[in-house]
Image (cartoon, grey):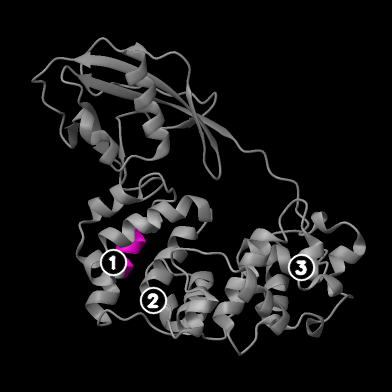
Amino acid sequence: MSGPVASAFPAARLLAWYDRHARRLPWRVSPADRAQGEVADPYRVWLSEIMLQQTTVAAVKAYFEAFTARWPGVGVLAAADEADVMKAWAGLGYYSRARNLHACAQVVARDLGGRFPDDEEGLRALPGVGPYTAAAIAAIAFDRPATVVDGNVERVVARLFAVEAEMPTAKPELRRLAATLTPSERPGDFAQAMMDLGATICTPKKPACGLCPWTEGCAARTSGSPEVFPRRAPKAVRPTREGVAFVAVRADGAVLLRRRPPKGLLGGMSEPPGSVWREVGAETAPAAPPLAGDWRRVPGVVEHTFTHFHLRLEVRRAEIAAGVAAPPDHWWSARGEIAGEALPTVFRKAIAAALDAGT
């Protein structure tokens, strides 16, 4: 691949930009605070990195602040009930992260004396910590010269070097090139600077190239079409699945819930009883409601898009008399307690649709 070399992008220039323009984030030690001797808390760095996996900064901020207010350290999080952790995570998505989060806290508290490993190898041995997360924690929390490559960094590097390979094939090359940029001095700040550059300047659309500290050497800017990088293969068509959610509403307003199996999509989370989700057009047996009752279909459908498929959920509602017991492995959640249940967004939508239909 022809084009610029790493020396065209001095780390000092990016770090000087970061010192002036670093985003204020609740888990971050700012350059100014670092200069006053403040150091990063590995627990907060780890928690933020787990939350930020496949989730936006804007979505994570409130969750992070609620988590750290309730569980300010790894020891108290390890001692928490997993069901409470799942409830606190509800709405953030990718729920296996919450189970791994709790498992990791227990390992650190029980086996490591409450201290996180300070290198990538040790961090990768923890539940839910993959290569990217290990590198991020090592760099940001312990200032190790680790190469941290998230989606923002991939975009920056793809543009700096005008990498022609399509994603995701280009990922190993982007990581290799990113490693040539990583300095031995201030690697934690450098990692965060790269992320901030991608999030605020080298954005997917209409990048502000004139404000970039590396604009002079950027091959994508020289090409005149920076937005075409990173190059992407055409997206595969996302299939559609369909299913039924049964929302039983007791006379006092309580809603019937159950817990999903611990493994798999939305594992361990709460849900109203429902059918298996099938591809549209697949032959399936009629879905059986959890209780006898006058089940009526709620107008419309609830739609939700997951990573690999789109879901269309038919909602049925029945009024259930007071005193009717919940079936085995189900429970009645009082109307005032539903907001605190570990309900993913799709099921909150289904319950809201059913309750609205009864008003």
Dot 2 and dot 1 residues touching (CB under 8 Å): no
Task: Report the Cα–Cα distance between label 2 and label 1.
Answer: 11 Å
Question: Where does the image place residue 71, in percent across and percent down from the top left?
Answer: 26, 63
Q: Is residue 257 above or below residue 173?
A: above
**Which sits earlier in the primary sequence, circle 3 or circle 1?**
1
| Residue where numbered disc 1 is placed | 72
Q: Is residue 311 left or right of residue 325?
A: right
- The majority secondary structure of the magenta stretch comes to helix
Q: Which is nearer the eye, 253 or 31?
A: 31
Question: Where does the image place residue 69, in percent across and percent down from the top left?
Answer: 29, 60
Circle 2: residue type: Asp
Which residues are the magenta region?
99-104
**Which sits earlier in the primary sequence, circle 3 or circle 2?**
2
| Residue where numbered disc 3 is placed | 212
Q: Is residue 341 left or right of residue 96?
A: left
Disc 3, SS: loop
Disc 1, SS: loop
**Which sits earlier in the primary sequence, circle 2 or circle 1?**
2
Circle 3: residue type: Cys
Disc 2, SS: loop
